[in-house]
Image (cartoon, helix red, strand yellow):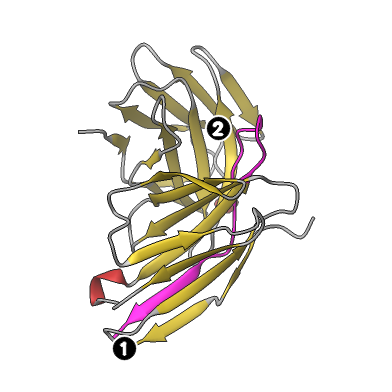
Amino acid sequence: DTGVSQDPRHKITKRGQNVTFRCDPISEHNRLYWYRQTLGQGPEFLTYFQNEAQLEKSRLLSDRFSAERPKGSFSTLEIQRTEQGDSAMYLCASSRSGAETQYFGPGTRLLVL
Amino acid sequence: ELKVEQNPLFLSMQEGKNYTIYCNYSTTSDRLYWYRQDPGKSLESLFVLLSNGAVKQEGRLMASLDTKARLSTLHITAAVHDLSATYFCAVDIAGTYKYIFGTGTRLKVLA
């Protein structure tokens, strides 16, 4: 068990560029969550996958945001046409069905210039 | 509006003292979660409270849940410096897979 991993850990981009983040959950975990956290705030729920199915999306996940989990293992979160307001820490978490504890990854810190 | 409110937002306390952090939520939920976050780090799960009246303890921390009052407490006993961190509570929205986090309580334990 190596825990939840995220890549990259840091990303600096210019406004208008597209970025993609990857999350590798704990291997036996079928549930995967994405959150966004800005400085001094709690995490905000973005989306939830059960296996490869995206079962829940927040209104925060605008048209510029898309997430996938094609084979029910790793997941990607893409932000198109980034804006300065997208600057935040993007957190991924995973859990097993029937177990309530979510295990969080280290996060990807995004800075949009 | 669905809200999770924590009180206090900032807490500075002396080592050895006791204190309680409060978490009020507005949505219907029977499950409440407590997390710890150290500066620049990710979140670590502390407690999962699954029913009304649930109480869990780990070391100097004890969490409880009153679903009727929509209130959870995180009690700190004889605080030590290592407990300095930000503590978040979170609830899941009944009938969905969405979670709402509180704004956090930043705890600083002074030696």
Q: Nearer the viewer, residue B43 or B2?
A: B2
Question: Which portion, as a residue range, is magenta?
Answer: A95-113
Give amino acid for label 1.
Lys
Image location (x, y in percent) of residue A25: 65, 56
User: Do tag 1 and tag 2 residues touch (Cβ < 8 Å)?
Assistant: no
Q: Which residue is drawn at the image coordinates 61% and 24% (left, top)?
A: B56
Residue A98: say if magenta: yes
Report the chain holding disc 1: A
Q: Secondary structure at mark 1?
A: loop
The alpha-carbon separation of the residues under discs 1 and 2 comes to: 47 Å
Circle 2 is placed at which residue position? B77
Instruction: State left or right for residue A13 relative to residue A1.
Output: left
Circle 1 is placed at which residue position? A14
In the rendered structure, find residue B27 and report the number of the disc placed on it.
none
Image location (x, y in percent) of residue A50: 57, 43
Give amino acid for label 2.
Thr
Q: Which residue is drawn at the image coordinates 49% and 70% (left, top)?
A: A108
Image location (x, y in percent) of residue A40: 33, 58
Report the chain holding disc 2: B
Q: Secondary structure at mark 2?
A: loop
- Answer few, some or many: residues within 10 Å of disc 2's Cα (few below 14, many 20 plus, some between 14 and 19): some
